[in-house]
Image (spheres, grey):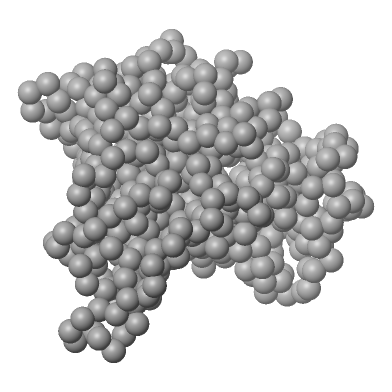
Amino acid sequence: MTRRRGRRGFGLLACGTLLLAGCGPAEPDRGAATTAPGPTAARSFAPGAAGVGDSYFPSYGNGGYDVANYTIKVRYDPETDKLTGTTTVRATATADLSAFNLDLAGLTVRSVTVDGAAARHARTDDELVVTPATGLTTGNGFVTEIRYDGKPTPLRTEALGEGGWLHTADGAIALGQPESASTWFPVNDHPSDKATYDVEITVPKGLTAVGNGVPKGKSTAGDWTTWRWSETSPMASYLTTVAIGKFRVTTAEHKGRPVFSAVTTQLPEGAPDRSIARTVEVADYLESLFGPYPFDAYGGVVVADSRIRYALETQSRPVYSAGFFRQGDNTEVVAHELAHQWYGDSVSIQRWQDIWLNEGLATYAEWLWAEHSGSSTVQRTFEQKYAGASAQVWRTPPGRPGVENLFGSSVYDRGAMTVHALRIAVGDTRFFGILRAWAAERKNGNATTADFVALAERVAGKQLDKLFDAWLFGTERPPLPKSR
């Protein structure tokens, strides 16, 4: 995510099931563990956990299963703001389950089946509790189909703002971090459970519906058009997006991959179009530093809505607020969001505390692009950020920022300063070796700060504890490192 300069905390997606220490609703009683009849009688079945146990957002996601694929088919009418959907979840049980949860905010569930058999379902706030006819055994795959409808409702909290499915002037957009997907489909809504996606979006004829991944064509029947998208690389749920409305669409091919970009027609043609048109140029430059581009498609979407004042690295097709282009062309924000395709999207965080791994590296990519473009050197930018950082930045450790500072300046700017301090400490050859190894070895997976530190020490061939302790976890300004 890129924040608009000079503003803090706006446009971030609210966390509808946020639980901080000691607050929030108590865990509902789902009944005692049950034993399935018949051949599985020797097993003890129990409900899956309502949350993955992330220390920042304990109720995000769910336990007991691992999703492989979501097939989502939705129909949306902007005139009535009504969404009708069917989502098929293909998953594998990681425990013997008598029941399991999916995250779903608002929307009315009409029916649920598991492996073709009707399943009982109940709602507890933004949790959908599914009880299959028979228990699900560890290691076995299962298929759940959920039919639902209603008016999507954005998620809101005082700490993180509003986001999710937003009804717009000419359609809708689903967007937000750290949570958004549950406002338009049932999901295991935590980045630790990545999956592939096949999405069909049916909208009134004349509107465009943009999604993630490779465009799979469109078809029109009567007054409705269905747009199809496929993301075959595992994707964290908050990186899913839908943008519905009237857009100037450009398509091309680059290195055998489709390029699909869309700029809202609410904006006059100009800086947004020119900036997004440089997507593959920026991606190729970053590829020369980070290693092969990790996905099967390129592109970008520019929207104009007062609630969206940020850019977000939605996988393979970032979304940008129109505000980034008010002063003219802006390829630095494009560099930031494209860097996330490696760091944040392909290599995803295992827990939200480690968000600096996404934002620090993406911010550093902005510095690299600025140097490549001739506007500033990385060293000069580092020194300016170091000298100009507020006391709050130094008091807030980016490796442990707390929920209230999850998208604060420490995570972005001090995170990027940490990256440059590492570069000075190990030299350019080992530094870029670390970045390439991180992208290659963790591709399509999840990782933590501890994993990054271990890889950096292995590639550098030396201990780096003091550096990371000072820059990531200290509460005082570290000494300015001397450039080589």
| Left or right: where 460 falls relative to 97 | right
Evaluate whether residue 251 shows in this view: no
Q: Looking at this view, is 44 or 62 the one in front?
A: 44
Residue 43's x, y, as percent?
A: 31, 85
- Report the front residue among 378 and 215: 215
In the image, residue 332 above or below residue 51:
above
Quadrant location of the C terminus? bottom right
| Residue placed most toward the observer, 162 or 125 | 125
| Residue visible at 37% across and 75% down in the picture | 33
Q: Position of residue 324 (x, y in %)?
A: 57, 23
Residue at the bottom extreme of this rendering: 42
| Residue at position x 50%, y 42% in the image | 16
Q: Residue at x 52, y 19 (%)?
A: 306
Residue 275 percent location from the top left of the image: 50, 25
Residue at 78% in and 52% down: 397
Figure disc tally = 0
Residue 196 vs 238, above or below: the answer is below
Q: Quadrant of the N terminus?
A: top right
